[in-house]
Amino acid sequence: MHMSRYFTDEHEWIDVEGEIATVGITDYAQEQLGDIVFVELPAEGTTFEKGDDAAVVESVKAASDVYAPISGEVVETNSALEDEPALVNSDAEEDGWFFKLRLTDASELEGLMNEAAYKKFVASL
Amino acid sequence: MSGTDDVTHIEELPLQTLPLDAWHRDKGARMVGFAGYHMPIQYEGIMAEHGWTREHAGLFDVSHMGQLTFTGEGVDAALEHLLPSDIKGLKPFRQRYSMLLDDEGGILDDLMVSRLGDGAFDGADIYMVVNGATKYDDIGWMIEHLPDEVTMNHMDEQALLALQGPQAGEALASLIPETADLLFMQSGLFTWRGVSLWISRSGYTGEDGFEISIPGEDARLLADALCALPQVKPIGLGARDSLRLEAGLPLYGHDLTPAVSTIAADLGFAIQKRRREEGGFIGHARVMKELADGPGARRVGLRIDGRLPAREGARIFAGSVEVGEVTSGGFAPTIGAPIAMGWVSTPYSAIDTALEIDVRGKRIAAVVAPMPFVPHRYRRKP
């Protein structure tokens, strides 16, 4: 199975399958944050405009906001992170996903990076 | 994603480098700006480094701190004017925790003060270590208040390394056997490979350990020798902060500020009986008043329900009444839960008082807890 994966310059990844987008933070982001001890996820049914505060990642040293990379309604959150927030460290780009959105404006995906572009972006930092 | 990094640049000036700058980078440290310097926040990760220090021994570079010496006739009396602690009764090779107070009794800085001996630091009388972010303000304040007969020297080319953890004693003794005899808050002059080291048995993690003052140009040699030992790994500022929080030790600029006083901060142990009775130090009136009437608010420890950490600035409530504020908080790796330190209005400051903390609009349950959160393991007289 191969979905389309997009990346943002805020270090989030988005897998799109039909009208559902799965959102997480990149391996680079978890590495920068360090040991993650808590993830505050949005309630199911919440609707976001692109750029809204969507989640908070607490590392040992600080809290960091995660923004909604695209507009949509939260249809599911990753309950595994409640018991094991360190999943974000160990598997940021698969099992450590944050939430799933039902897209309201698929055209917002157009401005995002693909994997190659994101790799290049990270290398430039 | 945006980091609300708790490590802030104190000054707009370009960051300076410390003697071990290249050494940290060679060890894979992530460097950040702290107290005006490039400093290592972490090497392999805060949790791993924290755990290593609690079980083995961690090497911390704290060369950003201000190392000062004082010499001259009347030095004890001059320092007793500046510090609320007993300096006249401080014996050679002994160290004491103290602080600088302003005219209103607010805390300008907390510090360690020791009486030198064996001709250390060119025969100076007193050695003091103050916080990095406040050192230039401290120096200005002291110059203003010290008599001409007392000379203060800022040793800005001296490095300071802290070796902390239950295996710190055996690790350091394998290089310098004589250090095995030191007890908590004792210090001495030692020689290692021809280099003079002023070493005290102290630190800020709650563990047994040492603070080692060494000329900057020799620091790399010692850091390499220590990290070549199986017990020792380099540890960054991140774990230093989580370790000191678990140990219940206040951090200047966060838990202590000029707005708070010694007694409210629960640091009355730093003011010995004679000093309380005789006074004669800057800020004495506030200390006496708070000893008599009790302070309006107290520094307390807080244990937090669940896993969501409460950070500096979070407001503390008893029902609908706001009763205080968190001044440091985070996840405690040794405990496996969030803990915090903060100011709470005196009627709500008793151990076991149930309170709530507002974290981003959510109320989380907390209880006033005794500190330290993790027992101290200092090496004291048996």
Image: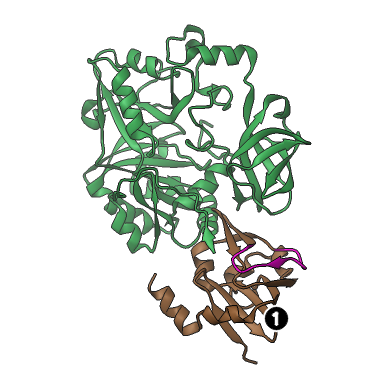
Residue pictured at 58% horizontal, 83% vertical: A5
Against B277, is A78 above or below? below
Mark 1 chain: A
Against A115, is A35 above or below? above
Which chain: green? B
Residue pictured at 73% horizontal, 52% vertical: B306
Image coordinates of residue B285 in percent, x first then y, are: 51, 11
**Residue under circle 1?**
A20
A13 on left or right of A77: left
Provide the residue span drawn in magenta. Answer: A42-53
Image coordinates of residue B124 in percent, x first then y, are: 25, 25
Residue B331 can be seen in this image: yes
Instruction: Name the image quarter holding the C terminus of chain B.
Output: top right
Which chain: brown? A
Against B183, is A63 above or below? below
Image coordinates of residue B12 in percent, x first then y, are: 34, 45
Looking at numbered disc 1 in the image, what kind of residue is underneath it? Ile
Q: Quadrant of residue A84?
A: bottom right
